[in-house]
Amino acid sequence: MRIGINTFLYTSPFTTESVKLFPKFKRWGFDTVEIPIEDPSHIDTAVVRGAAARAGIAIGSVCAAMGPGRDFRGTAEEQKTAMDYCTALIDQAAELGCPRLIGPVYSVVGKADAVEPEQRKIEWALVVANLKKLAKHAEARGVTICIEPLNRFETDFLNTCDQGLKLVKAIKSPAVKLHLDTFHMNIEEKDQAAAIRKAGKRLGHFHACGSDRGTPGGDHIAWPAIVKALKAVGYKGDVVIESFTTDVKVIARAAAIWRTIEPRRDDIALNGLKFLRRVLK
């Protein structure tokens, strides 16, 4: 398993200029970098790919930022906006030599409300139909879409591993897998290790975050059981630190980070990496 870091810890939005982070991540010992692309126009894929190659770090994943207007269960206009955006991200992932698009690739983040059963069926059908279409494009470009359940405060659509697996199975594409995150699972799963085992071979991506969005290992999560489960299902993908601090204001606001989680954000990266190297060994 490779260990990676999501650039949201240091910047938003990620632009072509943000490649200056790559040498530092490599020097610290990260194998991969995860790039949230908030707008496809923000990066020159050739320049970013070249910078990663020179730094000796792999671009392990492109992270979808499902902001306002990007909603596969919304209005016709919102569905089209989401499709255009995610299609562009798949194309950019392919150009970056990146194997996967990850994140809540189904609905705008923050849409969380009580939905009547009949409306839920309508929204589910819309998401399945849209993701089947998107998956065809991903198959053609050699990119895997890894769908991430979020906690109940960020979405009402997909919260658990069971729900995620149901969606993956409904799409019926070899280019679609599940993305699990320890922060969200800490809220929604009764047993994180059991959820990982249930995902099995359909697990395509994994986020290692502290229970408070801080440093992996500096929290109450049962990391040895999680690692044992990852190894039991034969997971060979990336384990990525996706933590946030108040240093990046727009992300802090979006993720409800209202206080200092760690003394320095470098502590999250460095101590998290050290912990994951040890526990994954």
Image (cartoon, rainbow, N blue to C red):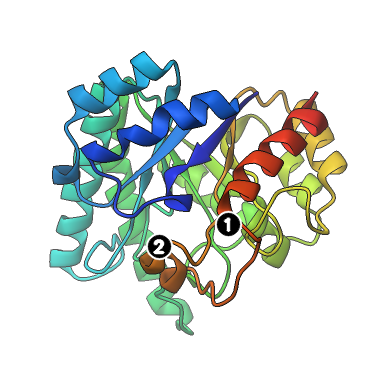
Decide if residue 63 is in sight here: yes
Give coordinates of residue 133: x percent, y percent. 25, 41
Residue 37, relative to residue 12: is it above or below? above
| Quadrant in the rendering for residue 59 | top left
Q: Which residue is mark 1?
A: 163
Picture quadrant where residue 44 is located: top left
**Marks 2/1: CA–CA distance:** 11 Å
- Residue found farthest to the front: 263
Q: Quick one: SS at disc 2?
A: helix
Front residue of 117/236: it is 236
Is residue 36 left or right of 239 when viewed as pictured? left
In the image, residue 45 lies at what x, y percent? 21, 28
What residue do we see at 16% from left, 48% from top? 84
Q: Is residue 116 left or right of residue 204?
A: left
What residue is disc 2 on? 124
Closer-to-camera residue (230/3): 3
Q: Which quadrant of the figure contains the C terminus? A: top right
Residue 10 position in % (x across, y down): 43, 50
First along the sequence among labels 2 and 1: 2
Mark 1 Cα within 10 Å, few/some/many (few <14, many 20+)? Answer: few
3, above or below 8, in the image: above
Quadrant position of the N terminus in the picture: top right
Residue at 15% from the left image edge and 66% from the top image edge: 76
Question: Could you tell me which residue is drawn at 25 percent across and 45 percent down?
Answer: 86
